[in-house]
Image: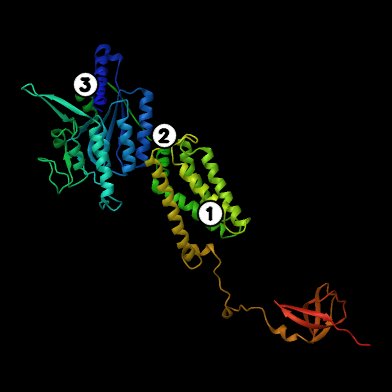
Amino acid sequence: MKAKHLISIIIIGLNFSSFSIFGADHKPLIYQIDIKKEIGSTTWLYVQNGFKEARGLKADVVILHMNTYGGAVLYADSIRSTILNSSIPVLVFIDNNAASAGALIAIACDSIYMRKGANIGAATVVNESGEKMPDKYQSYMRATIRATAEAHGMDTIVLRNGDTLVKWRRDPRIAEAMVDERIVVPGIIDSTKILTFTADEAVKYGYCEGIADNVDEIITKYLHYPEYTLHEYKPTAFDEIKGFLLNPVFQAILIMLIIGGIYFELQSPGTGFPIVVAAVATVLYFTPLYIDGLAQYWEIIIFVVGLVLIALEIFVIPGFGVTGITGIICVTGGLTLALINNVDFDFSGVSAGEAGTASLKVFSGLVLGTGVILYLSGKIGSKGIFRKLALETSQNVSEGYISVSLDPAKLIGREGIAKTVLRPAGKVMIDDEIYDAVSYPGFIESGTKVKVVRYETGQIYVEAVTVDK
């Protein structure tokens, strides 16, 4: 990557030369992207859109205006890769903080500039509670930040005595010390502390090219552009919404709502609230992915086919077999494939990490969905906001409710008169009381003498009495 660094310097030098030659006819275009919030799906969206626009405008330099305490390593790694692979020189201005994931992104840039009093470092991987993650996570981060520092290559320094010294432009060992307190860098950090540089320390040890108060000072003092055009990336409201919808935690919640909504809808007749929740969650899940080009129409079709197969298995086909299992595979497959940046059925450009991340999101959503189903299945109908989703009313005797009376069973063997035609249902009179009855067998004409032969499920059954001559 040393060649890339040299190319960046040459490009900046050529831009300055062209400005000097052509004067006001050529003003270098500086494209600025702000990273002033937690590193996540929204920040990643800013960088994606910003670099795309910078390439379209043929910007001379991209400057990241950074002030962040870190965020998700997944998105920081994606931003890092975009910077390392950029054909446009990328600088970063650390306006106070470049901690954790922010430090990884900053180290990826071709040049680092810091405000006086700013900091860079403390890149240990932690969880949502701020607790240090197990060593396997730290190991990955150590390798990533080390590789990022190594990507800038080595410089050859000619000493006064004519000898040459080859040294890393950014010492990978120093980068590792920002992640792991066990890393020792003699004269800089011992084995008990995580490394964080101040601006002056970063300059001293090769992790900062200069100190500045603002972006303008970087451009005029260090890039030597007395006149320039500054274009800033302006996020839209849609960017904010889309970034939120693409958050992996929110995507897992959407999957949970899809699975849970479908399950509870299948447990109750008609169309109700659960299926509405599932439908809205499905739209929110697939829409931003489809707009981004990740989710393709056939992946959405696979998901829908999976739902149809599951419905057929439950309502049409007895038991649970191949159809239901195929439906589950299609549903999970559609959800997973929508997160992968494949082209039709070509997965050659999909990395194992991307596939693993997509699978983890879907699996997390399925686990959450299953957990919610088990939890709510025990809560629905008992108390809380879910009590209205199920019929829980008890018809107690103390409240005037009674079961079917068994008194008519005492009429078995008694005789009476058919008051209406029994075809086969009708009415009979027994002991001056009128009862609903069913003839057994055949029809019985009105006025015929009848006898009660049995009583079942609240119904009297009678037969005609034969009169002996």
Residue at image position (30%, 31%) is: 84
Circle 1 SS class: helix
Circle 3 SS class: loop
* Earlier residue among tags 2 and 3: 3
- Residue nearest the viewer, comparing 400 with 131: 131
Q: How many other residues sit within 10 Å of disc 1, few (<14), some (14-19) or many (≥20)?
A: some
Circle 2 SS class: loop
- Residue nearest the viewer, comparing 18 with 142: 142
Separation (CA) of disc 1 from disc 3: 62 Å
Q: Which of the two discs, 2 and 3, sits closer to the camera?
A: 2
Residue at image position (43%, 37%) is: 341
User: Mark 3: which amino acid?
Assistant: His
Separation (CA) of disc 2 from disc 3: 40 Å
User: Mark 2: which amino acid?
Assistant: Gly
Task: Give the residue furthest to the right.
Answer: 469
Left or right of 146, for residue 259 = right
Question: Which residue lies under the disc numbered 3?
Answer: 224
- Image quarter in which the N terminus is found: top left
- Whether residue 232 appears in this view of the structure is yes
Q: Residue 305 at x, y = what percent?
A: 57, 46
Question: Which residue lies under the disc numbered 2?
Answer: 349
Q: Residue 462 at x, y = what percent?
A: 80, 80
User: Mark 1: which amino acid?
Assistant: Ile
* Earlier residue among tags 1 and 2: 1
Q: Which of the two discs, 1 and 3, sits closer to the camera?
A: 1
- Whether residue 118 appears in this view of the structure is no
Above-or-below relation of 19 to 298: above
Separation (CA) of disc 1 from disc 2: 33 Å
Residue 38 is marked as none
Question: Which residue lies under the disc numbered 1?
Answer: 262
